[in-house]
Image: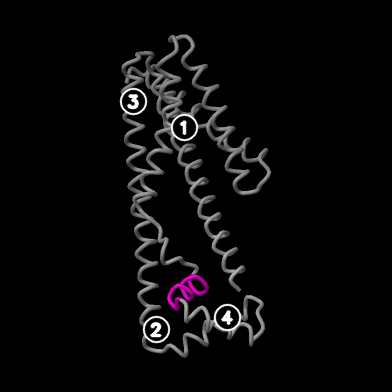
Amino acid sequence: MTESTHDEAHGGSLGERLNWLRAAVLGANDGIVSTAGLVVGVAGATDDRSALLTAGLAGLLAGSMSMAAGEYVSVSTQRDSEKAALAQERRELRERPEAELDELTGLLERRGLSEDVAREAAVQLTERDALKAHARVELGIDPDDLTNPWHAAWASFLAFTAGALLPLLAMVLPPADWRLTVTVVSVLTALALTGWSSARLGAAAPTRAVLRNTAGGALAMGVTYVAGTLLDVAGA
């Protein structure tokens, strides 16, 4: 039983790490697409480097702060739910310990243990740490490792910023005649990489993810460029 619990803990840690990696990849992808669409749209209306830089920085800061705030609120809600579930579990363990022992036994039986082994395992787990046993088996929560909203916010902020820097620098650093070409090629290459990475993290075939990612980015840049060009023609 000790070995099984040990493996389960490692599995949960691995799953959590993969979720963070996937969130980082998706955050970077959002930064690439949104900032690329913004600077390419502005490039359709003007070739002024200051205007491109201002628009790109504004999009980077607004997007990264929005992503960070959204992650903080979302993960804070999840953490509050986890803490409420743990508080309820503490009350139940205090008020009806025998019923909770029976419940833990039943949960272990449903995981494939025989009735006798499940009962013995439930007794041992309860004697060692009843709350942790119920949290992990019943709730799927590690009470010693609750989700951290600040970690999520910073991870999202940094991932989005890293992604957004690519199209911003690709647009403002090259000479005017090369800006659009360098940006489009850099963005599509980066989107192909993030599509491949997200597919590999999800154990999926990468070809479809790469095509979907690059097509979406190309569409976003195409639409915003046409919009910027039309605004320039209209004198807006």
Residue 209 position (above or below residue 85): above
Q: How far apart are marks 4 and 3 (CA)?
A: 61 Å
Q: Distance between the residues labelled 3 and 2?
A: 55 Å
Q: Are marks 4 and 1 in contact (CB under 8 Å)?
A: no
What's drawn in magenta, residue-wise?
Answer: 129-139
Chain-order first, disc 3 or disc 2: 3
Q: How far apart are marks 4 and 1 (CA)?
A: 50 Å
Q: Which residue is drawn at 48% across and 29% down?
A: 223
Q: Residue 121 carries which label?
A: 4
Residue 46 percent location from the top left of the image: 37, 16
Residue marked by disc 1: 32
Residue at label 2? 92
| Amino acid identity at mark 3 | Ala
* 33 versus 122 height, above or below: above
Which comes sooner in the sequence, label 1 or label 3?
1
Chain-order first, disc 2 or disc 1: 1
Q: Residues within 10 Å of mark 3 (few under 14, many from 20)?
A: some
Q: How far apart are marks 2 and 4 (CA)?
A: 19 Å
Is disc 3 in contact with disc 2, using a CB cutoff of under 8 Å?
Answer: no
